[in-house]
Image: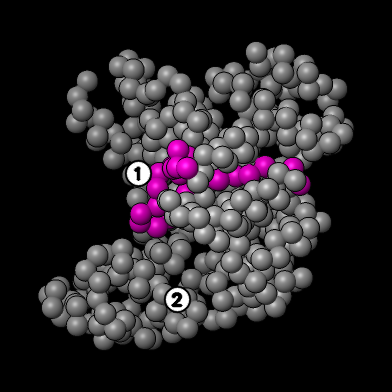
Amino acid sequence: MQIEEVTRLEADLDNFDPQVRRRALLRLVELSRRHDLLPREPRPIVNLHVHTFFSYNAYGYSPSKFAWLARKHGLAVAGVVDFDVLDALAEFTEAGRLLELKTCVSVESRVFVPEFADRVINSPGEPGIAYHMGVGFTTAELGGFAAAYLAGMRRTAEQRNRELVQRVNLYMRPVELDYERDVLPLTPGGNATERHICEAYVRKAEELFPDPAAREAFWRSKLGECPAERDKLQALLRAKTMKRGGVGYVQPGKGSFPVMAEMNRFVLESGAIPTLAWLDGTSEGERCIEELLQVAMATGVAAINIIPDRNFTPGVKDQKLQNLHDVIALAERYGLPVIVGTEMNAPGNKFVDSFDAAELKPFVPVFLKGAYIAYAHSVLQRQSGFGYLSAWARRNFDSVAAKNAFYERVGRELSPAREGVLANLPPETTPDSILARIK
């Protein structure tokens, strides 16, 4: 085996052509079995919140690439999440099957929370607006309200982007974008984000101002400065033109985003778990986290998502860390699985959180439990419709604690190679019989 071949195949995993990606993955699986390239046992680490290149990954990772790297790193469970689309679902699920990796697929969007209309939640400077999630989707082949809602998320995001580009173009002249020609080619599924738009502006400036001095002068005239690092330039561009106070920014109001209850309905009808996204506990809205949680749970929220790396500084005991302790304690009190990950949609995001850091070590069992529950839900929902919030689960568990213990055990003990033993189970199947099947 040549190291060069593995390197080339890993690069091919990020190709926009799905056939190229699949061929590369199949060859890597073959090589890994022949040459023992992958760890035999997983480590007690998970990342269930990674954006793929279907909604912007800072490193260009496709669903297959993240699955391969997750397996190489020894993640016990891995999960992807994309903004407004489920484009990664089929590929990531299949990659997990081929690699014998426990997987979970989620979606993220923004919603309006009427009860918090005058309080900032987790979208800075935007009262009442919240990033929100659904965890554990098992199919993108939806019907009825769920299908219409999913299509609407994609359509609304595209319209918002097109209008943003129109506004920013007026300011950035002569560097102006054509959405079809300059932005859409940067994403494989046509689901562009603000980060894709920033990359397109940087590329267009390089095209129009090939001379570095002239290009620097242009950026200074528009942004006030010109960072040498590409990622910092894009971040500055986004902050100055697309975020609050920027020339392209429009303050969202009532009607700009669907209400949280509507997204929760979409997630539930899709067989997934409505999930509250928590930032850091410092906003006015998140300082009232229990009130927010009760509002969310009233329309279906049954889990909470946290980005641990944002919430502590190694060696420092500060308010951020205390807020992390408080929100995890609250989640445990309500029996909410805690879903964690690093996002990877900005340069510098870690591949996996520092689970061995002193500040995170106490929470590792909680993080693992949430990941195992999400995986078990995904398998049981996909194979037999016995997901975490299913009618089957309601019939068979008289407490959240008992339900969590069951799904955690299934997620921990079930190997991906044996997921098929849970297929087409009859409605009268008992939790004990499922546990017996997976041994």
Query: Which mark is drawn over residue 301?
Result: none
Which residues are the magenta region? Answer: 334-358
Q: Position of residue 49 (x, y in %)?
A: 52, 47
Q: Nearer the viewer, residue 399 or 233?
A: 399
Please name the residue that numbered disc 1 is placed on.
14
Q: Nearer the viewer, residue 306 or 237?
A: 306
Q: In this rendering, does residue 192 appear at all?
A: yes
Q: Judging from the image, what secondary structure is the residue with disc 2 in?
A: loop
Image quarter hosting the N terminus = top left
Query: In the rendered view, does 286 fall on the left or right side of 293?
Result: left
Q: Is residue 380 magenta?
A: no
Q: Judging from the image, what secondary structure is the residue with disc 1 in?
A: loop
Disc 1 crowd, CA 10 A, few/some/many (<14, 14-19, 20+) = many
Q: In this rendering, does residue 144 appear at all?
A: no
The answer to which of marks 1 and 2 sits earlier in the sequence is: 1
Query: In the rendered view, does 379 fall on the left or right side of 312?
Result: right
Q: Residue at x 74, y 42 (%)?
A: 335
Query: Which mark is drawn over residue 242?
Result: 2
Residue type at mark 2 is Met
Would you place residue 226 above or below residue 77 in this image?
below
Q: Position of residue 296 (x, y in %)?
A: 75, 58
Q: Residue at x 85, y 22 (%)?
A: 428
Query: In the rendered view, does 405 fall on the left or right side of 203?
Result: right
Would you place residue 345 above or below residue 30 in this image?
below
